[in-house]
Image (cartoon, helix red, strand yellow):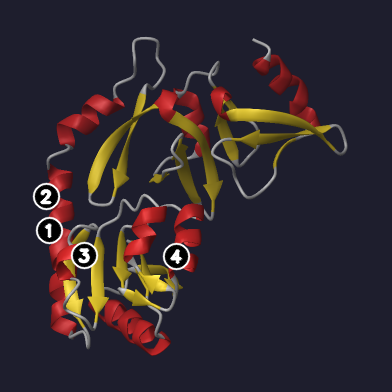
């Protein structure tokens, strides 16, 4: 499981990190963030983690502001020295509210609660997952079952902007810029999609035609794409793939 810690006091963050590792060494802490601003930027640029540990009073404001700027879909364990925010916390994805100094047994109980919730929702999805895996009558996949926090949702392919590979993970991004991690390779995903709608523009990106907003010339006879939602890197089509891409766009 991937988690992130949002905590403005570095000693507290380090103590929590060690406590999490003591409970379950397999938990990967993907990032330790110290401000609302840094948290928003990270969540906008990365797939949602399985769980967030979140302090409330940060250096640049209350962490509740994060929810105003990003569609946080992960469950949250709030870790704070103040008890007056508990009601508002449970309006923002909270599954537990731990008061500092955080006791090891309280942390263990919170993580067990997360596991129980996860198992409950996962066990009720078996039939839905089988149905999701059935191909459409034309042989092309019409929807993907993806995880959002402890829940699963069905996303229609028509609502998907693109897929991309990063750091040995494959992510799906929908038209609302929500990111989801998939357990399939881009090659496997490409095989089940309608080739008239999706195109593998390079090794990293598999793009829906409707997500392409601009095509620009690029040095050495290559092309560069601008997509929506936008990305922070250049999406470049190699010279060898340009003819095939133009043919696909012109179909």
Residue 201 occupies quadrant: top right
Q: Which residue is mark 2?
A: 120
Q: Secondary structure at mark 2?
A: helix
State which mark lies toward you, 4 or 1.
4
Q: Quadrant of the N terminus?
A: bottom left
Real-space CA distance between mark 4 and mark 1, rounded to the nearest whole angstrom? 27 Å
| Mark 3 crowdedness (10 Å alpha carbons): few <14, some 14-19, many ≥20 | many
Answer whether labels 3 and 4 touch (C-beta < 8 Å): no
Q: Secondary structure at mark 4?
A: helix
Q: Which residue is mark 3?
A: 89
Q: Secondary structure at mark 1?
A: helix
Which numbered disc, 2 or 3, marks the residue that appears first in the sequence?
A: 3
Question: Where is 246 relative to 37, above or below?
Answer: above
Residue 19, how many percent across, how many down? 27, 82
Which numbered disc, 3 or 4, marks the residue that appears first in the sequence?
A: 4
Real-space CA distance between mark 1 and mark 2, rounded to the nearest whole angstrom? 6 Å
Q: Which residue is mark 4?
A: 39
Q: Secondary structure at mark 3?
A: helix
Real-space CA distance between mark 3 and mark 1, rounded to the nearest whole angstrom? 20 Å
């Amino acid at each position: 499981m991937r988690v992130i810690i949002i905590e403005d006091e570095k000693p507290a963050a380090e103590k929590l990190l060690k406590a999490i590792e003591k409970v379950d060494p397999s938990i990967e802490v993907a990032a330790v963030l110290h401000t609302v601003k840094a948290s928003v930027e990270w969540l906008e640029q990365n797939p949602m983690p399985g769980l967030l540990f979140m302090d409330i009073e940060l250096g640049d404001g209350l962490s509740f502001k994060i929810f105003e700027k990003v569609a946080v879909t992960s469950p949250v364990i709030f870790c704070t020295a103040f008890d007056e925010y508990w009601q508002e916390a449970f309006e923002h994805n909270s599954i537990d509210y731990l008061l500092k100094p955080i006791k090891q047994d309280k942390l263990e109980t919170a993580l067990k609660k997360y596991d129980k919730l996860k198992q409950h929702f996962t066990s009720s999805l078996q039939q839905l997952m089988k149905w999701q895996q059935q191909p459409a009558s034309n042989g092309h996949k019409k929807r993907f079952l993806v995880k959002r926090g402890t829940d699963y949702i069905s996303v229609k392919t028509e609502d998907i902007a693109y897929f991309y590979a990063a750091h040995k993970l494959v992510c799906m991004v929908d038209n609302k810029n929500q990111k989801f991690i998939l357990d399939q390779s881009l090659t496997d995903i490409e095989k089940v999609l309608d080739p008239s709608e999706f195109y593998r523009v390079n090794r990293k990106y598999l793009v829906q035609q409707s997500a392409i907003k601009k095509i620009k010339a690029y040095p050495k006879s290559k092309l560069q794409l601008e997509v929506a939602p936008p990305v922070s890197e250049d999406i470049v089509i190699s010279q060898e793939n340009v003819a095939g891409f133009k043919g696909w766009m012109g179909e």
